[in-house]
Image (cartoon, rainbow, N blue to C red):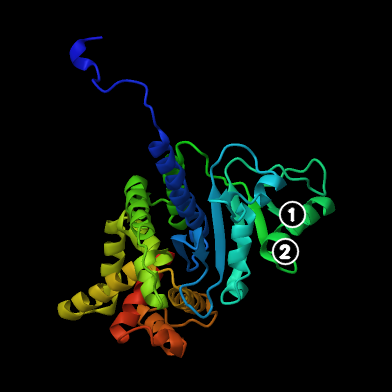
Amino acid sequence: MNSKDKNPLFAPQRDKAGSWTFDKYDYQYHWALYEVLTKHKERKEYAVFIEYHEDVIIADSLKVDSAKFEFNQVKTTSGAYTPYQLTLRKKKKAVEGASILGKLVSNITREDIGSKISYANLVALNGFNLELKDKGVCLNKIQLNDLSENQCKEIENAIIKELKISSLPVNIQFVIPELIEHSYDVQVIGIIGKLVNSLFPASQCNSEEIYRVLIDELHKKGKVTYDFSKWDDFLEQKALTSITVSTTIANFTSIKDETTIEYSFNEICNELGLKSIYKTKLHRAFNRYRQLRISNNSTIQIDTKNEIIDLIQNKINASNNIDESFESLLEFVINNMKQNIREQFPDETDIKGAIICEFIMLN
């Protein structure tokens, strides 16, 4: 080897704990992102919080009144967890601390939030050595009723003794993650590509840029250590939300050939006989709705899209449809649109822009 190519710092490292610790915590961030991306194709609202009460908390709504929470401890230690390891209370400065499972259960038995927790998951990269009641089965998600009676009783007795509770909550799950230990960033980038393809077939996206923006956002939110008494402040400062994910995907994805979309829009405007100034105004409304359609995963946005599509289909499929002009289609959809959907638009031009957008996307 040429001396000028030699690394002057090359030598066995005395301490690799820093790198190992970073990798351990970075896996948690990637697992959180991987989990919400698998949920994203359902087009439902969600928010994910890192390092807040638990390693990862996932909310299934952005509305505080209806949100349910999934608490997750994410463990990357080597070896499969045994019941003994799950319930072992390690001493800290001669004081007996909480066990791994005890810490998880203590959060979900809190009176202030316990009823809003759907599941409490212990996610272990290297799995669990637990006795199941059905011999020979292999599960990646183990619930209490999957355990043998003796195994379940052993774990329950230990946690009851530790936490002084009457019984073990039934919403505990032991989860083996799909995300692998090494090259987890590559796996997340891969699922982004699959997600975009399932949402928008034949589209083109930059999966790596989407990944970079989302993981950076998650890292930034994970570093926030303040407490927030207001839900909206909490979402803004601490959460990666479905809206942010949708917007990021939209920014780095070409949903449909722009030339085809513009041609279809101009064809409709020509049929309607629009003057230049109103055509420009309608085009702006069309683009506003199109961007919102892609980037907003809220329930009302999905309901708006489905309402317009259903009305368009009803008009097209009507057996007595004598007037087949686009003007008649606009009038039909506008006149039959539900009031709560109509109220989402500032004026009739925005409604027409939305109808034109959905009509083009259908064809």
Q: Nearer the viewer, residue 260 or 99?
A: 99
At which x and y percent is residue 330?
A: 38, 82
Give the labeled residue for mark 2. Answer: 168
Q: Quadrant of the C terminus?
A: bottom left
Q: Amino acid at mark 2?
A: Leu
How far apart are the two marked residues, 2 and 1, measured between alpha carbons? 9 Å
Q: Are marks 2 and 1 in contact (CB under 8 Å)?
A: yes
Q: Relative to 142, say whether 137 is above or below.
A: above
At which x and y percent is residue 173?
A: 66, 56
| First reached walking from the N terminus: tag 2 or tag 1 | 1
Q: Nearer the viewer, residue 285 or 266?
A: 285
Q: Relative to 269, say whether 338 is above or below.
A: below
| SS assignment at label 1 | helix
At a point 36% along the width and 74% down the height, the residue shown is 233
At which x and y percent is residue 81?
A: 65, 43
Can residue 7 be seen in the rendering of this structure? yes
Q: Quadrant of the N terminus?
A: top left
**For this view, does 352 lie left or right of residue 60?**
left
Give the labeled residue for mark 1. Answer: 155
At a point 26% along the width and 74% down the height, the residue shown is 269
- Looking at the image, which residue sits at the far top? 1
Neighbour class for label 1 at 10 Å: few (<14), some, many (≥20)?
Answer: some
| SS assignment at label 2 | loop
At a point 28% along the width and 58% down the height, the residue shown is 258
